[in-house]
Amino acid sequence: MSLEQYYTEEGIGERLASMLPPMTPRQCVELSAGEGALLLPVIRKWPKVKITTCELDPQNVSKLKSSFKGNHYNIDVLSESFEVVFRGKFSRFDFAVSNPPFSWRKLSSYDISILEIFGLRDVFSGSRIRSEVLFVLQYLRLMAESACIAFILPELIVCSSVFAKFRSRLLNFCNVVAVAEIGSGAFKGTEAKTYILILRKSESVESFPYTNIFGVSVLKQQSDFCLGLKESNVECQPYSSSDKFSIKRGQFSGKECKSIGLPFYHTSGFSNSAKGVIPIPLKTTMILGKKVLIATKGDILISRVGSRVVGRAVVVEEGEYLVSDCVFRVRLPSSISPKVFLEYWVQSCFPRVVSEARGTCAKYITVQDLTAYLREFLRFSDEGFASAVR
């Protein structure tokens, strides 16, 4: 059985502890404690706090018992065992820390019972659910009024539109106290981009500090959390036809591009021929029932997905190429040299794209992300940047 454990680096725990509001907790609970990395800074800050942990791995439970005085349980907290262990202890804890499992799970009858407690069954009506969602709700059941919970959560939960309704409903039970962005690769075994999210139960807070990966903090409203902090942070309206550039994504997979026989561009680069197939003449805008996207001389191609290649950009020098679905084709105003943009992209954008790319497995960027960078470039171009670097 693989427990998919992505242990917390102690430095992240220290950062989390530094973000907490003034408090002197008496009882701290962690429901996926691992080896206790998040608990170490808690103990250093509040030596007298009482510790309660839950952990699936029996070896970790033994380590927790030898390292921390308190109650340690070898249970699955997303099962009826949780009800048995914590009977009579709900709404008792005044502090919690958590780095829950990052995973999808098949929705069980017990999971449904948790959702129904919070009136969230309509939000998660499918057959699968994220483990992180259920962990958040289990913590809320345990916490006393005004208690704080400090989470480490993946970008999918904190920023994506998929979980916007969940975040909005969540604010009926708690408010955001602080959010801080953590770079990709902070956890051994995964490249997931994560966030420190601190919530306070049953308290009304109008604004909270949001700190990006570069250490820059700005005040955000609770509504920003609902909408997704990634989009709020870049302060960018959705891409539209009124923009002075175009962004389009290919329709064919790399395998399909190769089978068609036309020259194509995929994340692996340019391919001018496909062995063993008969080239199909490009006489229509449809091939294999899909709309064709072609890149020609002067077009900019940017890899959309792939942990090793995301954000890599090239300019088509000659010829025509079919564009795969892992690539964005960008066209700028005719007055702007694609090579000038490429220089700007490499110097000013690519490092940020790599560090801020989304995704818990394969890293990727969206049209919205790319739109923000292109608008930034055009703003600099209007201010004379293009002529300065020629």
Image (cartoon, grey):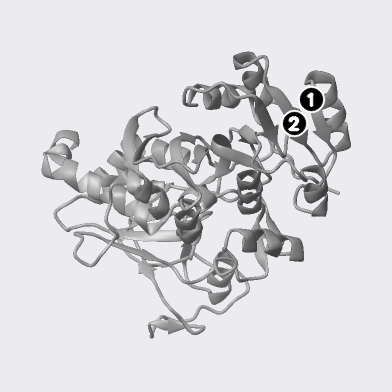
Q: Amino acid at mark 1?
A: Gly
The residue sitting at 18% across, 58% down in the picture is: 333
Q: Quadrant of residue 9?
A: top right
Q: Is residue 143 left or right of residue 348?
A: right
The residue sitting at 65% across, 34% down in the picture is: 93
Secondary structure type for disc 1: strand
Query: Which label is found at residue 148?
Result: none
Residue 349, visible in the rendered structure = yes
Residue 371 against residue 355 in the figure, above or below: below
Residue 366, x across and y down, in percent: 42, 56
Q: Residues within 10 Å of mark 2 (few under 14, many from 20)?
A: many
Residue ID for mark 2: 52
Secondary structure type for disc 2: strand
Quarter the C terminus occupies: top left
The residue sitting at 41% across, 53% down in the picture is: 226
Q: Quadrant of residue 145?
A: top right
Residue ID for mark 1: 70
Q: Amino acid at mark 2?
A: Thr
Question: Looking at the image, which is closer to me, 26 or 154?
Answer: 26
Whichever of callouts 1 and 2 sits on the residue coming sooner in the sequence is 2
**How many discs mark residues in the rendered view?**
2
Residue 225, x across and y down, in percent: 41, 48
Q: Is residue 308 left or right of residue 33?
A: left
Residue 41 against residue 54 in the figure, above or below: above
Q: Evaluate if marks 1 and 2 touch, with contact meaning CB atoms under 8 Å apart.
A: yes
Residue 58 against residue 336 in the figure, above or below: above
Residue 7, visible in the rendered structure = no
Question: Looking at the image, which is closer to me, 270 or 26?
Answer: 26
Question: Looking at the image, which is closer to me, 62 or 359?
Answer: 62
Q: CA distance from mark 1 to mark 2?
A: 6 Å
Residue 269, x across and y down, in percent: 49, 54
Residue 53 against residue 264 in the figure, above or below: above
